Image: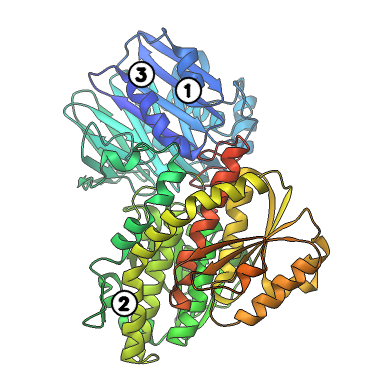
């Protein structure tokens, strides 16, 4: 939800900001703007993409070396020019960009209006910049002190970058609930919502903690302190991120690149943690809490969206293999329904970005009730791993396409490792069975590679035929029920086609009424168990003239003879089958969306990192 960048140093700020905003565009792309100091503060903003802003600003770059930039996902106020960031205080003295929500903005705004301030936008952000201005005037203090005092008066979430024309040698950043990284160069500093805008200039970064602010001067000095005014010794980390990882690498879209990266991302997520020959799973992050995890009464999984679907697969895995009770919860529902929790519960929070506000709030609640909270997260150093007691990273690498693909399969792989680890330690599966599943998990990357090579052209062909449908139904059973949900989510979010996922057997309780000759029904049928039952479900669809696209195992001959289309995936252990059946569904949504002319990497109304409630 919104990307922010800032720069102070000796270089020309404009190209740094524009390039940075393009990298952060996955966080929001409804409007963009920059403010640069060059004798005075000059602003360019535009509703639309960063490329639109770049066009508008062409030729206007006056070479300032201090600046801030913003790409917006609108929460307060339409995504138009007046609501685009940056926002100013009176007389364009202070300029500010913001990611997050100032929850008490209405009361601050009312007070500021009473004191004579004029508002030019519908945003919550503008209330903050006027508040800072008012405090600085009243207290006659430096800008950083005014920012600190103002942040003590706001509730909600923020990552901000701010400067004033009264002191163009200073840039200030602060965060609470929304991420902010400081890059440290030679007498220059960068600010950004993640490290991607910083990586080509410096590898040295500080991840600010909640309620921390960074005050950076042009002469190379930086002070990190809390908004309670406690000065901190900054922990400078070296970035491991590589530039290639955030570029398209010859693919037309990030989504397609990320779909094709799955053999590697799963390999990287499993590597060093599993030895099928020796029969070992090593999860260093969890060993400290081994006793507590193995004795858990219940595992509660909290997540949102695609990560929630990975959690559903995990429910099958943990119950099936480790014989432990599992509940999977939408993070926000969990948070607001007064759940019964105890110290014997283990909570697993799953998140690609590590910044999802709903998941963070649910974790906070679980921690306050004494639960052990484990994180499964893709972004190193993000808020969710920092808030967890322990956990496991997925090593999928940066996921930039807004629709999650490789993060999902990496999550499922890591959750499989966790379930295997627990099952092995508890003795709920035999050593032989453990080795069978472990060996097969090691084979999954090459089977995904095979799936990608074999089904790409076929999926493209099917997409051409089905692309004009208005609705799709996705059906799956057991381990592949969550895959049906995930397939439907992928299609709707990037092609804007209405799609629903259902347990196949549930179809007769309602959705069957939708089936006619216009309705493609995607049936995930590569499970070995319940195979006959899936065939019955397919027959029920065919009897009503529905168009069946079935995902089947490579040895299948029966369904092939029934369904209008079949896509074959390699055979595998049933508990690992979601890792293969997901692949053609990702490609199906990708090809249908591109054939319909949709922007697959930046679908409308969405943002990759949902840092607001
Ligand atoms: C769907 C998608 C979203 C995210 C959800 C949670 O393709 O990307 O549904 O899965 O917003 O995000 P994370 O995993 O970052 O917590």
Q: Residue at x 46, y 77 (%)?
A: 575
Residue 374 visible in the picture: no
Q: Position of residue 555 (x, y in %)?
A: 50, 73
Residue behind mark 2: 439
Judging by the rendered image, the residue that carries numbered circle 3 is 14
Q: In the structure shown, which secondary structural element does the residue marked by tag 1 occupy? A: helix
Q: Position of residue 319 (x, y in %)?
A: 49, 83
Nearest the viewer among 244 and 97 is 244
The residue depicted at 34 percent of the width and 85 percent of the height is 434
Question: Distance between the Cα atoms at labels 2 and 3?
Answer: 52 Å
Image coordinates of residue 20 in percent, x first then y, are 37, 30
In the displayed structure, 320 sits above or below 142; it is below
Left or right? Give the position of 396 relative to 408. left
* Element type at mark 3: helix
- Checking the image for residue 580, the label placed there is none
Q: Element type at marker 2?
A: helix
Q: Which mark is residue 51?
A: 1
């Amino acid at each position: 939800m919104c990307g922010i960048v800032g720069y102070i140093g000796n270089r020309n700020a404009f190209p740094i900001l524009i390039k940075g905003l393009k990298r952060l565009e996955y966080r929001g792309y409804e409007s963009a703007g920059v403010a640069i100091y060059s004798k005075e503060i000059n602003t360019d903003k535009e509703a639309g993409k960063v490329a639109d802003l770049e066009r508008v600003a062409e030729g206007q770059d006056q070479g300032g070396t201090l600046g801030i930039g913003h790409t917006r996902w609108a929460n307060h106020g339409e995504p138009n020019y007046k609501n685009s960031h940056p926002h100013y205080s009176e007389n364009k003295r202070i300029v500010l960009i913001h990611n997050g929500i100032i929850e008490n903005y209405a009361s601050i705004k009312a007070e500021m209006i009473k004191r004579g301030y004029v508002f030019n936008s519908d945003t919550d952000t503008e209330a903050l910049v006027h508040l800072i201005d008012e405090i600085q005037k009243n207290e006659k203090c430096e800008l950083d002190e005014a920012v600190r005092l103002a942040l003590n008066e706001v509730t909600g979430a923020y990552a901000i970058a701010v400067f004033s024309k009264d002191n163009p040698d200073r840039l200030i950043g602060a965060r609470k609930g929304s991420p902010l990284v400081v890059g440290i160069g030679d007498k220059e500093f960068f600010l950004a919502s993640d490290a991607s805008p910083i990586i080509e200039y410096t590898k040295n970064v500080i991840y600010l903690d909640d309620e921390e602010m960074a005050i950076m001067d042009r002469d190379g000095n930086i002070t990190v302190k809390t908004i309670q005014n406690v000065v901190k010794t900054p922990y400078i980390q070296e970035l491991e991120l590589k530039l290639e990882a955030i570029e398209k690498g010859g693919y037309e879209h990030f989504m397609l690149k990320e779909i094709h990266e799955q053999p590697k991302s799963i390999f990287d997520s499993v590597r060093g943690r599993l030895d099928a020959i020796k029969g070992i799973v090593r999860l260093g992050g969890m060993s400290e809490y081994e006793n507590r995890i193995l004795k858990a009464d219940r595992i509660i999984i909290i997540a949102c969206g695609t990560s929630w679907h990975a959690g559903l697969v995990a429910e099958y895995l943990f119950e099936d293999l480790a014989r432990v009770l599992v509940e999977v919860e939408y993070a926000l529902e969990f948070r607001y329904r007064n759940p019964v929790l105890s110290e014997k519960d283990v909570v697993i929070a799953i998140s690609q970005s590590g910044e999802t506000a709903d998941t963070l709030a649910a974790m906070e609640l679980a921690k306050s009730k004494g639960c052990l909270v484990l994180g499964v997260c893709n972004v190193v150093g993000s808020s969710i791993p920092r808030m967890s007691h322990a956990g496991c990273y997925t090593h999928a690498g940066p996921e930039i396409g807004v629709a999650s693909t490789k993060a999902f399969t990496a999550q499922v792989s890591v959750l499989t490792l966790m379930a295997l680890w627990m099952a092995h330690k508890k003795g709920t599966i035999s050593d032989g069975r453990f080795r069978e599943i472990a060996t097969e998990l090691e084979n999954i990357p090459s089977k995904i590679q095979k799936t990608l090579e074999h089904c790409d052209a076929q999926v493209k062909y099917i997409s051409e035929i089905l692309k004009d449908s208005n609705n799709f139904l996705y059906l799956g059973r057991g381990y592949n029920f969550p895959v049906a949900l995930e397939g439907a989510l992928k299609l709707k979010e990037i092609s804007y086609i209405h799609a629903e996922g259902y347990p196949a057997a549930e179809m007769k309780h309602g959705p069957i009424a939708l089936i006619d000759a216009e309705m493609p029904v995607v049936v995930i049928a590569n499970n070995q168990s319940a195979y006959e039952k899936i065939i019955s479900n397919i027959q029920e669809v065919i009897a009503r003239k529905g168009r069946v696209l079935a995902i089947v195992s490579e040895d299948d001959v029966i369904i092939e003879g029934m369904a209008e289309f079949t896509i074959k995936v390699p055979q595998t252990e049933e508990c690992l089958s979601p890792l293969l059946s997901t692949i053609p569904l990702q490609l199906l949504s990708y090809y249908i969306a591109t054939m319909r002319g949709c922007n697959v990497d930046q679908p409308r109304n969405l943002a990759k990192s949902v840092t607001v409630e």
